[in-house]
Structures are given as C-alpha cells and as structure tokens.
Image: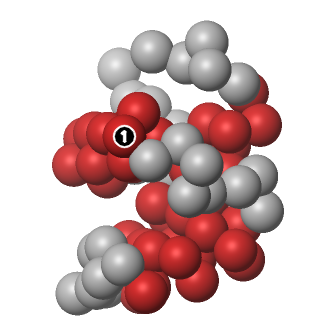
Amino acid sequence: MRILGKQRSKIITRAVRQLYEHLPDKFKADFEYNKKVMKEMNIFSESKVKRNIAAGYMARLIKKGPSVK
C-alpha cells in the first residue's frame, strides 16, 4: 500500500512535540513567527527546509490545542 502526500520524518515530529511540551509559551500559531524563533534557537539549523516543516507543524499543533498526543 502506498501513502500519498508529504511525509514528516519521525525526527521532526518528535522534536517539535518535545518543544511544544517544554516551551509552550515560546511559540505561537503563526508560521513566520515560529520560523524566526527556531532560527534564533538553532533548531534544525542544518536545513532550511526541515526548519520550515518543523515551524509549520508547530503552528498546526498549537492551532489544534493541547489535546495532541
């Protein structure tokens, strides 16, 4: 069975969820703001694409609320 659509790696997903648990006040539901914060914190500094994916996922988690596991 083939899964269509873009996939987030487990590394990005885990890292973003840990950041969300430990620093919930540091991030907002705004992608551009999260991207800037992650750049300042040197999170995924090796790849701009990974950092953007992580910032987008963080915004999505915050919009969904604290019920995300």
The residue that appears at 23% across and 87% down in the rendered structure is: 46
- Colouring rule applied to residues: secondary structure
Q: Which residue is mark 1?
A: 22
Front-most of 41 and 32?
A: 41
Q: Secondary structure at mark 1?
A: helix
Q: Amino acid at mark 1?
A: His
Q: Is residue 9 left or right of residue 51?
A: left
The residue that appears at 61% across and 12% down in the rendered structure is: 67
Q: Is residue 60 left or right of residue 30?
A: left
**Position above or below: 63 against 11:** above
Q: Position of residue 16 (x, y in %)?
A: 39, 48
Q: Quadrant of the C terminus?
A: top left
Q: Is residue 28 left or right of residue 17?
A: right
**Position above or below: 4 against 66:** below
Q: Position of residue 37 (x, y in %)?
A: 53, 76
Give the tally of numbered discs: 1
Which residue extends farthest front?
25
State the image quarter where residue 55 is shown: bottom right
**Position above or below: 62 against 41:** above
Q: Quadrant of the N terminus?
A: top left
Can see residue 6?
yes
